[in-house]
Amino acid sequence: MSGESESIKARVVEFLRVHGLLTRGSGHAAAAHLLVAASGGRDSTVLAHLMARIGAEWNTRVTLGTVHHGLRDEAEEEVRFVERLGATLGAGVLVRRVDVLAEMRRAGGTIQTAARRVRYAALEEMRIEAGASVILTAHHADDQAETLLAHFLRGAGPDGLTGIRAVHGHVARPLLGIDAADIAAYATTRQLEWIEDASNATDAYRRNAIRHRISPAIADVYGPGWVRTLGDTARLNASLSDFLRQVARARAREAIVVDGDDVLVRRISLNDSSEFEKLMVCRLALRMLLDITPGFGASFDLAALIGSSVGTTLQLRDGVTARNEADGLRLSPAPVPRDAVHLHLGESVRWGAWTFTSEDLGAQRPAFDNDSGTELVDLESIGVHWRLREWTHEDRFEPLGAGREKGVGPFLTAAGLPRIRRGRIPVLEGPSGIIWVCGVRLAHAAALRPRSRHIGRLRFFINEHTES
């Protein structure tokens, strides 16, 4: 037994303890339940092995969760490997099958981004099914370094240069501070078996190209320590990003004023601001009008508009109009339709700066999407003819998971949405009442049941405009 092997175990225990994920149980009751994302590869196999040892010592229950992406012939073998691994380690195993290509057709992007979306959605389903508190993934220090390089080269802002967060939501990454070489040494010392993913050998994916070409070149110049250096940089950037966000929000409280449906960025409050503060304030102002975090391109445009002549107007993405007035910048959202729109299954309609789509999936039951703008529904319960309309103060519905009926207005207020956003969210209504407060919460009556036979997918998303 090597000292380095035990060192890795001790570091993982320390990570879990520091983040409150590991406490000793008493008697026969397990103190915690952790879901390990297992692919059959070396890194996740090492993590599963470590967690089985740690779980036995700390009376912590461990379940392995594996996702069948349906992209490679080896996928079935990998699932069987994880099932055997679970049996060997005394851990439960959950399996989810997802359709990555269908996700690409639905939401676009690369095959890797689509796979990532459905993978994390499937892992979250398994976490809930298992009753686990957190999902553990096997991302390590080399992954962090490669991520930081990729984000830097694509022109990411401060948030993007934080790299992979050690803990984010229900996902934790206890190997993030450990080098790939140390993980490989642990696997060799313990004589572990794993499955090599053939796709890791190709440079067709950008991440692999960085790993095979750029990383070795950097190591030749700076030595192997560059990986941990970038890991420290990512942690520093994460702290800096959190600090800058607090500073910007403090400045925004002085500079941003809600004026009806518009947002006004007061010029006098930004006179002594740094360029970065102006950028962040403009970005937060845009965020108040949209349900997504805008890119920095629009923020640079708005910061430049502050110094232009009064009366200058700029048309931004997503239907937002910016006008330089005497008091500052006035940001106006795209107008909201006042008339209800009648539609039926399969139609796509515009709603202001948004688009609503629906599709018939038949009996197909895809993986749930963790995007609040997408919902799967039971079409037998809600019908196929609907209305998209503004909500009123008389509207009531039973939100999924709430257990009782609520007014739409109070529900949106309790959800923490800004007043401007609350007034611009439509509801989808069917013959039996409200089906969906779009992009926020599905009605209980519309949700899928275990025996649902006719499934539909609803989407409500921001339109992709070009800069003008």
Image (cartoon, rainbow, N blue to C red):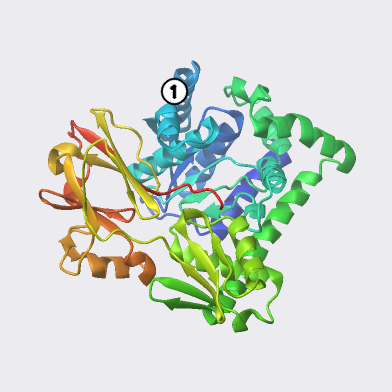
The residue that label 1 is drawn on is 70
Taking depth in this image into account, of 253 and 40 the one nearest to the observer is: 253
User: In the image, 272: left or right of 94?
Assistant: right
Residue 231 percent location from the top left of the image: 71, 50
* Residue at left offset 56%, top offset 62%: 314
Figure check: 280 above or below 102: below
Taking depth in this image into account, of 319 and 446 the one nearest to the observer is: 319
* Residue at left offset 48%, top offset 40%: 36
**Residue 168 visible in the displayed image:** yes
How many numbered tags mark residues here? 1
The kind of residue tagged 1 is: Gly
Disc 1 is placed on an element classified as: loop
* Residue at left offset 42%, top offset 54%: 25
User: In the image, 392: left or right of 251?
Assistant: left
Residue 22 percent location from the top left of the image: 50, 54
Residue lying at the far right of the rendered structure: 221
**Residue 178 visible in the displayed image:** no
Residue lying at the far bottom of the rendered structure: 268
Figure check: 182 above or below 205: below
Residue 334 percent location from the top left of the image: 41, 60
Taking depth in this image into account, of 174 and 402 the one nearest to the observer is: 402
User: In the image, 290: left or right of 157?
Assistant: left
Which quadrant of the figure has residue 366?
Answer: top left
Residue 274 percent location from the top left of the image: 70, 74
* Residue at left offset 89%, top offset 40%: 221
Figure check: 314 above or below 33: below
Q: Quadrant of the N terminus?
A: top right
* Neighbourhood count class around disc 1 (C-alpha, 10 Å): few under 14, some 14–19, many 20 upward: some
